[in-house]
Amino acid sequence: MRSLFGISFTFLASTLVACSSSDANTAGTAPVISELNWAPQRVQSGPASQIILGTLRTNDAERDVIELHVVVTPPGGTDTEIAPIAVPNPNPAARIELTVEVQATFRQTGAYGFRVWARDAGGRDSNSLSGQIESM
């Protein structure tokens, strides 16, 4: 488990679901994240760990997304990037849905912000999407 400004992360699982069979293979194209969802969005602060389930959809014509990146900003803290999450490769489709379970301990009350983006084998970063989890 990795501790980060009052929040601890353990990546329990990452799954890949193909959503479509293919798009035109365009060399040099960065992936695009089209949707990001997570639950729960409100948690209790304290020493007990909780599971956060996150799902995102990506479009990647080259089918070479290799990792997800996450930056977390705890209440009153500074942005900190956590270790990249490996994505199964090669991806079976240009449109994929990724699901990640995160075990987290929210020791402070307040809003924990996060930003997520994908990186492909060519080192190209997707757009980033943001969210927050409120710890009470």
Image: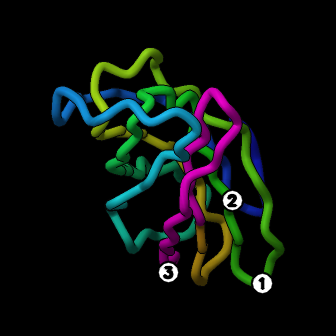
Which residue is more in the foreground, 23 or 50?
23
Residue 24 place in picture, x, y as percent? 30, 34
Badge 2 element: strand
Measured in 3D between alpha carbons, the distance from the residue under mark 3 to the one under mark 1, in whole angstroms, is 15 Å
Measured in 3D between alpha carbons, the distance from the residue under mark 1 to the one under mark 2, in whole angstroms, is 14 Å
Q: Is residue 97 above or below residue 117?
A: above
Q: Is residue 128 magenta?
A: yes
First reached walking from the N terminus: tag 2 or tag 3? 2
Residue position for label 3: 136
First reached walking from the N terminus: tag 3 or tag 1? 1
Q: Residue at x 67, y 37 (%)?
A: 84
Q: Amino acid at mark 3?
A: Met
Q: Residue at x 67, y 63 (%)?
A: 72
Residue position for label 2: 71
Marks 2, 3: nearer the viewer? 2
How many marks the image carries: the answer is: 3
Query: Given contact means CB atoms under 8 Å apart, are the residues at marks 2 and 3 in contact?
Result: no
Residue 88 placement: quadrant = top left
Q: Residue furthest right?
A: 78
Query: Given contact means CB atoms under 8 Å apart, are the residues at marks 1 and 2 in contact?
Result: no
Q: Is residue 130 magenta?
A: yes
Residue 119 place in picture, x, y as percent? 61, 40
Q: Amino acid at mark 2?
A: Val
Q: Residues within 10 Å of mark 1 (few under 14, many from 20)?
A: few
**Does 69 sit left or right of 95 as displayed?**
right
Which residue is more in the foreground, 54 or 117?
117
Q: Point out the stretch of residues depicted in magenta.
A: 115-136
The N terminus sits in image quarter: top right
**Does 120 sit left or right of 123 as displayed?**
left
- Which mark identifies residue 76? 1
